[in-house]
Image (cartoon, helix red, strand yellow):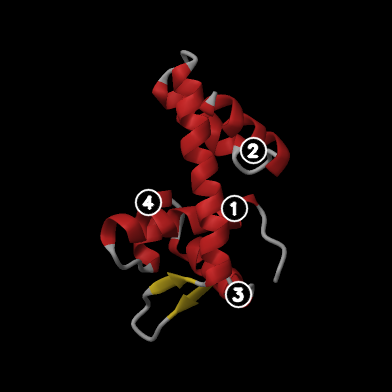
Amino acid sequence: MKQLYESGEMYLETILTLSQSKGSVRSIDVVREMGFSKPSVSNAMKSLREGGYVEVDDMGLITLTKSGREVAEKIYERHRVLSQLFINIGVSEKTAIEDACRIEHVISDETFEAVKRSIKK
């Protein structure tokens, strides 16, 4: 597996959420959702494909591989949990979502698991 950086995680998370809402995902959907240029998304898809995180079929449909889905689900769970935590403690929804989006990529597994445990109490 190729090293995955924050931007790669964001792409995988976006592909996951788009596939949940739309069913099928193409690069143009990612362009529209993320607001990036077509060449940027094309380069990212190439890198994710080479890293074994996505597959793109002859019709341009993007699907997550097993490892791609695992990363995407992990990041998306962090996003949901952290956003809700911040909202619950009084942060505005817009700020909570923005902060969660940044933190979800750098928080350690240990700290995130502790956050989840503390929420369940």
The residue sitting at 60% across, 31% down in the picture is 117
Q: Which residue is mark 1?
A: 7
Q: Which residue is mark 2?
A: 113
Q: Secondary structure at mark 1?
A: helix
Q: Which residue is mark 4?
A: 33
Question: From mark 3 to mark 4, how far is it between C-alphas?
Answer: 22 Å
Q: Residues within 10 Å of mark 4 (few under 14, many from 20)?
A: few
Amino acid type for the residue under numbered disc 3: Gly
Q: Give residue 17's position: percent from left, percent from top.
A: 39, 53
Q: Secondary structure at mark 2?
A: helix
Q: Which residue is mark 3?
A: 52
Which numbered disc, 2 or 4, marks the residue closer to the eye? 2
Residue 28, quarter of the rendered image: bottom left
Reading the chain from its start, which is encountered first: label 4 or label 1? 1
Q: Quick one: quadrant of the C terminus? A: top right
Residue 115, quarter of the rendered image: top right
Q: Between residue 51 and residue 85, name the one nearer to us.
A: 85
Mark 2 and mark 4 residues within 8 Å of each other at the beta carbon: no
Amino acid type for the residue under numbered disc 1: Ser
Q: Between residue 85 and residue 46, name the one nearer to us.
A: 85
Q: Quick one: quadrant of the N terminus? A: bottom right
Reading the chain from its start, which is encountered first: label 2 or label 4? 4
Specify whether 121 is left or right of 113: left
Specify whether 98 is left or right of 106: left
Q: Residues within 10 Å of mark 1 (few under 14, many from 20)?
A: few
Mark 4 and mark 1 residues within 8 Å of each other at the beta carbon: no
Q: Give residue 41's position: percent from left, percent from top.
A: 49, 63
Q: Up-down: is 100 above or below 29?
A: above
The residue sitting at 49% across, 15% down in the picture is 89
Amino acid type for the residue under numbered disc 2: Glu
